[in-house]
Amino acid sequence: MSAEDVTLSGVGNYGATETTAPREDVAETNVDDDAYAASIEVTKIQNNRRFGFKKWKSRVTKRPLETRSTIVKELYSDPKVVKAPRSYVTCSFGNVIYVILFGWWLSLAYILTGIVLAITIIGLPHAKFCFKLAAYYIWPFGKFVLRIPLTPRLSLLTREAEIVNPSKRTEADFLIEDSGESTASSTIPQAPPHNPRKRHLWCWSRPSFWVFIFLGFPVLLVFHFLVLTLSWFLVVFIPVSKINIIGIRSVLFEDPDRIFITKQGLNTERASHEVILCSYQAVNRYYYKYTVEGMNVILVNLLPLVVASILMGFLDHNNVIPSLVKFISALAAVIPLAYYIGMAITSISAQSSFALGAVLNATFGSIVEIILYISAMIKGKKEKSGGCYVELVKSALTGTLLATMLLIPGLCMIVGGLKHREQTFNSRTAGISSALLFVSVAGAFSPTLLAITYPVQEAVNTTCMRCLELNESRVGLNYSGPREVMFECTDCFFNESAATDSDYENYSSFMKPLSLVCACVLPIAYISGLIFTLKTHKHIHKLAQDDIKASKSAHHSYAAEWSRLKAFIILLVATVLMSLVAEVIVDNIQSILGSSGVSETFIGVTLLALVPDLPEIVNGIQFALHNNIALSIEVGSSIAVQVCLLQIPVLVLFEWFYSVGFVLRFNNVSLWSVLMSTLLMNYIYMDGKSDYFQGTALVSVYTIFIAMFYFIPKTTGHC
């Protein structure tokens, strides 16, 4: 609340609590809770520096509003704050947009409802009430909705007016004047605090209320719900949502005779009135910072897309909804699920031991990608087109490596360099990540190097879909050579399912054993990195100065956003939903492969690689904006290491137990692009400094590589 806001003691705050000294036992408990909450936030900050842990920018503890800025405080306040008359402006562009988008048809709904109620005669009191609210909702800004307290004198006036003529009551009948007989009434004690349990007792004996409930309330509820939903999803119009929520909860069920709408605010005559609603602006552009249960409101708004995608994917058996629509919606549904999984992992890790946090990050840190990849390969096996889906998975792995080594650090360096000119980081810490990355890439691409250097026939054969028989004029009349020369093939691809027995024998003797060796050695390197950073060389990852400041500010936290139990439940639910969404994606990806005109390699390198990594991209950019480029770099490096040390070994071992045609042999384009990216990234990290020029170089190389994958010929025959 700004300094211009007016605090009215005793006005509209019947439920205000008195300031009392806290009991000693309560005070001690609060201190312990604060210390525990502070330790949670400090642990999260420390985990950001450790290898194998997710780098998470958002807080995992609640931050009290007292420590927030005035702008943020206003986001979480109800539209009941009374401001000084000249401290606000109601004529703004956002308010005009409100009238165009919401105000006119919400007001029209009240007018039509009032007409219907007036026709019944019995509902005339509520008809007048609807007309008053229609005038309010067309332009609610700068107006005050007041509840008149039920004092003994007002109770008498109410009963007398109801006996004489209930339809001729006005607001003036309820105002206590300061002249004449009101002098005696000034000694009447003030109304007791508002009791919500007794607020609606008046309605049971009013026929007009029941007419309103059956004829008017359902229609108004639908219109309010539509306005509330649309304004909430538009984010910047969330103040409109709050107005509608209070309107449904506190206005519609109120006694019409006790509701008073005015533009003049509170004065001495209305000092005892309670403010139900007062709004000044329909739009607040800072609502992108608003959080619900610790999650950003934009991500919360994407949760209905998860449910819609699952319902469309599993109930639409006749393909009434186009497959392209289902694919896009399911792919977008991955974004909020990935955020919730990341938040749950970070919350549990911050409230647990390092060992449990490391295990949790290793098992669930790549769960989104692993579920998606395994679902795709199982789908390919069922449809006997495994080569297409396996190539899609390999391309997604390649795209993830390129994005984490080039795109994420490049974007972070550009954003951080433009804001802070030049940023520095610990080159030794970056060197440890680089060494692990070299080990990761070497182990993951060793089978590919073997296949290139010493060509062996893998468990694949070349299958040609469009082969044209040549005429005799092109091969000669007297040609007696091999029959294959008589055909010209225009669409050829590798097909794992078309291999012969000798092909499988060669594959089992060379490629498969080497793949298994790599799959067993790479996790050992991951465990070695954990021991190095968590046990033997903890001093290398000591907190930087900015993290120390963040640790001190953590002592203002009151409690964790999610308890361990709540975070664990959210993690399990999000994982189950992710498996269902992945099933929808792979079931409908065929529409993209068949109609996009680009190869499955390009789709894997871009869509399937980037969408699950969007939370990490956002976290990295936020770290860079706060001048913490070291964590921005670690975001990309840690993901790349997890891809090679965890995801690829899991896929190889899955192939060992359930054959889906996954061969740890990447194409030459993937091999050389990843090797060049690794060298370039390590060269950039050598001096321990970054700026926007280095970031531009990384992003430029990434763009060139993506363009190269775009021009890879499409092999539609096997998809």
Image (cartoon, rainbow, N blue to C red):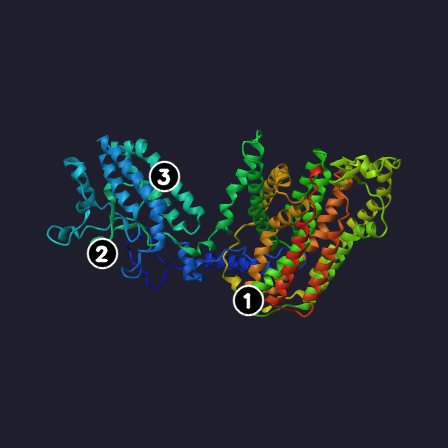
Q: Using the rendered view, name the quadrant where residue 206 is placed.
A: top left
Which amino acid, mark 1?
Leu
Which is in the foreground here, disc 2 or disc 1?
1
| Marks 3 and 1 close (CB-CB < 8 Å) | no
Q: Is residue 326 above or below residue 424?
A: above
Residue 261 in view, yes or no: yes
Secondary structure under tag 2 reads loop
Residue 148 in view, yes or no: no
Which is in the foreground here, disc 3 or disc 1?
1
- Which residue was labeled with disc 1? 418
- Which residue was labeled with disc 3? 223
Distance in Å between CA atoms under marks 2 and 1: 52 Å
Which amino acid, mark 3?
Phe
Q: Position of residue 335 (x, y in %)?
A: 57, 47
Distance in Å between CA atoms under marks 3 and 2: 33 Å
Q: Position of residue 541 (x, y in %)?
A: 66, 65
- 460 or 511: which is nearer to us? 460
Which amino acid, mark 2?
Asn
Mark 3 or mark 2, earlier in chain: 3
Q: Is residue 424 above or below residue 381?
A: below
Q: Using the rendered view, name the quadrant where residue 543 is placed.
A: bottom right
